[in-house]
Image (spheres, rainbow, N blue to C red):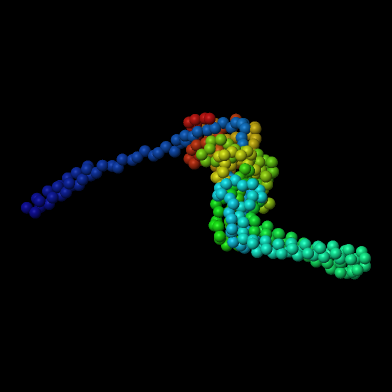
Amino acid sequence: MRKLYLPLLISIACLFACSQKKEEKPATTQPAPSRNRPVQADAYVVKARPISEDIQVAGSLAPAEGTDIRPEISGRVVSINFQEGSFVRRGTLLVKLFDDDLQAQLKKLEVQLAINEKTLERYNELLKIQGISQQEVDLSQLQVNNNKADIQLVKVNIGKTEIRAPYDGRIGLRNVSLGAYVSPTDIIATIRQVNQLKLEFTVPEKYSNLFKPGKQISFSIDGVEKKFSSTVLATEYFIDANTRSLTVKGIVKGNDAALVPGAFAKVDLDLDKNDNAIIIPTQAVIPLSRGKQVIVYKGGAPSFVQVTTGIRDSAYVQVLTGVSLGDTVLISGLMAVKPNSQVQLSKVK
């Protein structure tokens, strides 16, 4: 019996192994991606056209003159003769300080001068008849001169109690009240010459030599659509070491009511211009660690060319060397293009 079962078991094992091999399916292989697929890119045909380099910088409007009104001497305010925000003329009395003591001193000196002048007159008469020496006449004359000098000094001090407008302008808010005691460190008010404005702005260091006195500048302010003009008056004599920029000051033409001191100005600067420049779109230029390059399309293959650039505006840049008129440069898909890539143009401008 044992001899009959052994062949049967071997047959069953063989049948089971065959069925397992039939159930196993071979793995399907994915087709390899094509490595010769062309890169889709847009291109631009190099042209010659006018180009100018324009930038916009921030500026501010300032009064032609601005002064803090301070007293020269300490004293008590006895009168305030201006309205806040009003226009005042040069020489207008703005504030008066207490000066009764100085006025009394002036009257005393004037009386002394009158007496000394009478005495000098008598001495001169006596000198004619040899009734007095020349020395006594000279001493009397000296006393008269001293009186006149003292009177002039007191008048100067009285003038310091009268605070007047240094020029025509608009007075600001006052910082003192009637009866207040003020000193030279106190600011009574601020006066600004608003009938003439200045435009102040800064330009990058590399453009500093372009701004000479007399250069015309255009600018605009928020909320007003029209353009305003200014003429360069002067520039600072040094470049700011922190910002590497030059401060420029110009005189605003006209006296438009929309222009007020302290307003923010957007200054348009026309820095350079070429009427027949070889230009390409700025996105065609690939910056490198040392220099720049563009991809020139020739016969379906890319060619990487080193270029030097010049003037640029918001959309185009001037090419000085590297490409010529009529060349076709790629302006899109630049990161996907390799030296051995096949390029297919989608759009040519």
Residue 296: x %, y % from top left: 56, 36
Q: Work out whether residue 150 can be spotted.
A: no
Residue at x-position 92% and y-position 64%: 128
Give the image location of residue 159, x and y in percent.
Answer: 68, 57
Q: Residue at x 13, y 50 (%)?
A: 9
Q: Farthest residue toward the left?
A: 1
Expressed as whole percent of the image width and height from the top left, the position of residue 19 reads 19, 44
- Foreground pick, 203 / 281: 203
Q: How many marks?
A: 0
Q: Nearer the viewer, residue 345 or 62?
A: 62
Is 186 drawn above or below residue 58 in the view shown? below
Relative vertical location of residue 23 with respect to residue 123 in this rendering, above or below: above
Residue 277 visible (yes or no): yes
Is residue 6 rendered to the left or right of residue 254? Answer: left
Q: Picture quarter containing residue 266?
A: top right
In the depicted structure, whether residue 160 falls above or below residue 90:
below
Q: Position of residue 316 (x, y in %)?
A: 57, 36
